[in-house]
Image (cartoon, grey):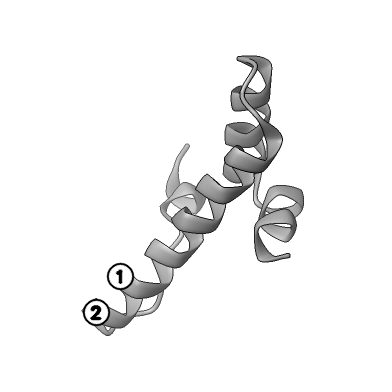
Amino acid sequence: MCAISAIQHNPKMKQYYERRLETGKNKMSTINIIRNKLILRVFVAIKRQTPYVDTMKFAA
């Protein structure tokens, strides 16, 4: 459910999801990739002991 929520509310995840579907990739495999991306972000934040910073907010 987190991956579905990320697709709905995170513009970069939504863009990634739509781009993969346009190339003919399977929906479920794309959702699994997004799940892995979310898990990776969590583990990196824990390992670095810093909060997650969305760098896209700073992009012009």
**Alpha-carbon neighbours of circle 1 within 10 Å: few (<14), some, or many (≥20)?**
few
Residue at the (73%, 65%) spot, across then down = 1
The answer to whether the residues at label 2 and label 1 have Cβ atoms under 8 Å apart is yes
Residue 7 in the image: above or below residue 39: above
Residue type highlighted by circle 1: Val
Which mark identifies residue 44? 1
Estimate the x, y position of residue 30 in percent, counting from the top left. Answer: 59, 39
Which mark identifies residue 6? none
**Alpha-carbon neighbours of circle 2 within 10 Å: few (<14), some, or many (≥20)?**
few
Which mark identifies residue 47? 2
Residue type highlighted by circle 2: Lys
Estimate the x, y position of residue 2 in percent, counting from the top left. Answer: 67, 65
Horizontal side of 60 relative to 16 (left or right) equals left
Residue 15: quarter of image: top right
Estimate the x, y position of residue 53 in percent, counting from the top left. Answer: 41, 66
Residue at the (40%, 64%) spot, across then down = 41
Q: Secondary structure at mark 2?
A: helix
Residue 18 in the image: above or below residue 54: above
Residue at the (32%, 82%) spot, across then down = 46
